[in-house]
């Protein structure tokens, strides 16, 4: 069965229930959300009644909790400890996000590994390992999914070896996994046309069972551009058929696929129409016009 969804908004008015309502509007059976704005540390208390409502709606609409993904804020940087106060804050904030996920019953938390900035790359990766070993505890019912990164600036986690090194050295290995991002893979130097070869290499070095989520995004840039600029499905350099191959790959059948593609005109979410394209396996050359017309007439 296709497990497909998108990033949705978590707003205090309805919290997780609002995420479910938006997911149903898009015709999806999975979703990803942030528990607050990804650029800041402001967080509102979780309302258990809203969570219960969300879980009831999910049950009624066959959305499994195991297909719900949370994303950690961008501001968490575990790679740089040049400012120890900021490094310790990043660990505390990640710990808080873990607790919020577990309160909501969500098991998967996607995390950008971090940026080395001016630090030695190997040392920066050791900082990520130390931080995860400090933050994770045996009682956690959580899996931190390390996202494959594009290589913009001094990002860590830009190839199999860096991700594998982190996983190899985290003590609680059952609590770490990987989130593949097709745009990031492309921009880091992986040819999505050769996705089978990439999965084979991944399986040998890390193991396919560690893949907990796939972010499905086209890319505005070419292979190895290290830009990290998402594009709508089929409108970028990766292409519709290549992305379909990832989405419907038999080795990833049970892995949630999450769209993070850009809003049209920075205003209209594309997900309802992109998910329809994916389900029908048919590219829509009028995607932008159809989205604008739909939301203007809604």
Image (cartoon, rainbow, N blue to C red):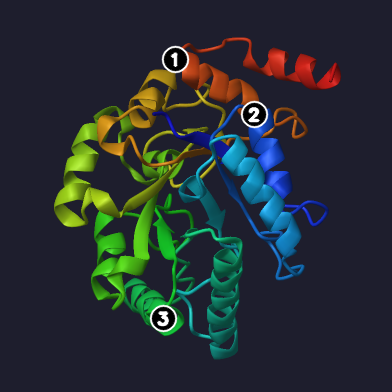
Residue 189 left/right relative to 16: left
Residue in the picture at 75% in, 70% down: 45
Q: Is residue 9 visible?
A: no
Mark 3 sits on what residue? 137
Residue 281 got which mark?
1
- x, y percent for residue 256: 44, 41
Q: CA distance from mark 3 to mark 2?
A: 36 Å
Q: Nearer the viewer, residue 258 or 265?
A: 258
> Circle 2 is placed at which residue position?
26
Q: Which of the 4 image quarters holds residue 34?
A: bottom right
58 lies above or below 285: below
Count the marks.
3
**Which class describes the residues within 10 Å of circle 1: few (<14), some (14-19), or many (20+)?**
few
> In the displayed image of the protein, which residue is found farthest to the left?
204
Horizontal side, residue 63 vs residue 287: left or right: left
Count residues near mark 2 (Cα–Cα under 10 Å), then give few for <14, some for 14-19, many for 20+: many
201 in relation to 287, above or below: below
Numbered mark located on residue 181 in the image: none
State the CA–CA distance, disc 1 to disc 2: 16 Å
Image point (40%, 75%), residue name:
128
Measured as percent of width and height from the top left, residue 286 is found at 63, 10
- Depth check, front residue: 48 or 202: 48
Q: Secondary structure at mark 3?
A: loop
Closer to the eye: label 1 or 2: 2
Identify the secondary structure beneath mark 2. loop
Kindly indicate whether the residue at mark 2 contacts the one at mark 3 (C-beta within 8 angstroms).
Answer: no
- Marks 1 and 2, the one that precedes in the sequence: 2
Q: Earlier in the sequence, mark 3 or mark 2?
A: 2
In the rendered view, would you say 171 is above or below 259? Answer: below
């Amino acid at each position: 069965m296709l497990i497909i969804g998108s990033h949705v908004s978590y707003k205090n008015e309805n919290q997780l229930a609002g995420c479910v309502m938006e997911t149903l509007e898009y015709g999806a059976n999975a979703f990803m959300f942030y528990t607050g704005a990804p650029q800041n540390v402001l967080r509102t208390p979780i309302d258990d009644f809203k969570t219960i409502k969300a879980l009831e709606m999910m049950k009624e609409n066959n959305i499994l909790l195991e297909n719900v993904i949370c994303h950690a804020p961008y501001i968490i940087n575990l790679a740089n400890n040049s400012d120890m106060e900021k490094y310790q804050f990043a660990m505390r904030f990640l710990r808080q996000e873990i607790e919020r996920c577990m309160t909501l019953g969500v098991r998967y938390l996607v995390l950008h590994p971090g940026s080395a900035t001016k630090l030695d790359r190997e040392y920066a990766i050791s900082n990520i390992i130390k931080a995860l070993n400090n933050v994770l505890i045996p009682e956690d019912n959580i899996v931190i999914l390390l996202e494959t990164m594009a290589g913009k600036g001094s990002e860590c986690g830009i190839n199999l070896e860096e991700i594998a090194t982190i996983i190899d050295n985290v003590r609680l290995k059952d609590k770490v996994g990987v989130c593949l991002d097709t745009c990031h893979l492309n921009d880091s130097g992986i040819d999505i046309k050769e996705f089978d070869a990439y999965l084979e290499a991944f399986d040998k070095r890390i193991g396919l069972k560690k893949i907990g989520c796939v972010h499905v995004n086209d890319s505005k840039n070419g292979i190895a551009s290290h830009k990290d600029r998402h594009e709508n499905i089929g409108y970028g350099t990766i292409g519709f058929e290549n992305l379909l191959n990832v989405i419907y790959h038999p080795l990833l059948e049970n892995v949630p696929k999450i769209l993070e593609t850009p809003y049209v005109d920075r205003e209209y979410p594309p997900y309802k129409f992109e998910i329809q394209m994916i389900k029908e396996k048919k590219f829509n050359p009028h995607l932008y016009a159809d989205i604008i017309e739909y939301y203007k007439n809604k």
